[in-house]
Image (cartoon, rainbow, N blue to C red):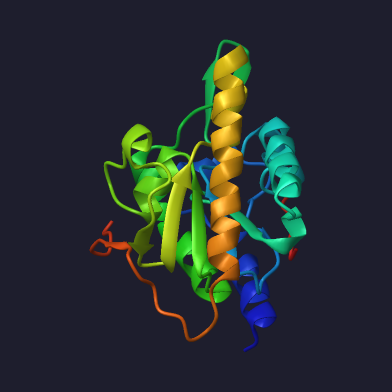
Amino acid sequence: MTKQERLIDYKRRVLTCKDCSLWETRTNVVTGEGNIDSKLVLVGEGPGENEDLQGRPFVGRAGKLLEEILLENGLRREDVWITNIIRCRATLKEGGSVRNRPPRPQEVQMCKKWLEEELSIIKPKVIVCLGGPSAEVVIHKGFRMTEERGIWFKSQYAPFAIATYHPAYVLRQPGRAFDELRWMLSEDIAEARRKAESQDEEVAPEKTISLPPQEGGEQLNLF
């Protein structure tokens, strides 16, 4: 099968996933989207309210900030592949309201096969982990953002992987902290673009940190 045929087959199967309890409260399964031939993949944590409603990743406030930063670095979201470590929104009911919550370890583990299949189709050269939870899956467990942000690692999913702050986390920072973290996020995206552009099919990774592999009403969106 071609890449596109494999992706269509993958997305049809993931729409029926009931491996964890998140299927009971989701509106849509949210898979990745973008350029299936991109060397650069961005991996976030999981869908929020807007993503769950639209069935697309990074379409809320965090997504708008990410798009701004991509544009600052000469990229559109259509130029890269954007996905998450889980496919369904993780929620918590409090009183009469529903809010987002971090995915539980077992939910991440159950959904990991879908991320792995998606990445095996795209075959990125460079992965940017947006936030610590993504880095724990793609790079290594116990990832420390304050100490390891901006360092290149070798991942089982790509020759080069780097982690930076999640746009949603940046948006929660006040004043000067927001400006500083936004700048860091943009700089890391710029570095990832440079790394991706420097790669071709014959280039092997150099000067990376090697780590062992980790154990570790719905709509179909192709792009």
User: 196 or 98, which lies in front?
Assistant: 196
Q: Is residue 173 visible?
A: no
Q: Position of residue 114 (x, y in %)?
A: 49, 62
68 vs 175, left or right, is right
User: 31 or 110, which lies in front?
Assistant: 31
Identify which residue is drawn at 55% across, 56% down: 192
Q: Quadrant of the C terminus?
A: bottom right
Measured along the vertical axis of the image, is residue 49 above or below residue 87? above
Q: Position of residue 158 (x, y in %)?
A: 44, 68
User: 37 or 147, which lies in front?
Assistant: 147
Q: Position of residue 209 (x, y in %)?
A: 28, 60
Q: Quadrant of the N terminus?
A: bottom right
Q: Where is residue 222, by image quadrant? A: bottom right
Q: Position of residue 87 (x, y in %)?
A: 56, 50
Q: Where is residue 6, by image quadrant? A: bottom right
User: 195 or 77, which lies in front?
Assistant: 195
Q: Is residue 19 visible?
A: yes
Identify which residue is drawn at 59% across, 22% down: 178
142 vs 163, left or right, is left
Measured along the vertical axis of the image, is residue 93 above or below residue 143? above
Identify which residue is drawn at 48% across, 86% down: 202
Identify which residue is drawn at 74% across, 54% down: 74
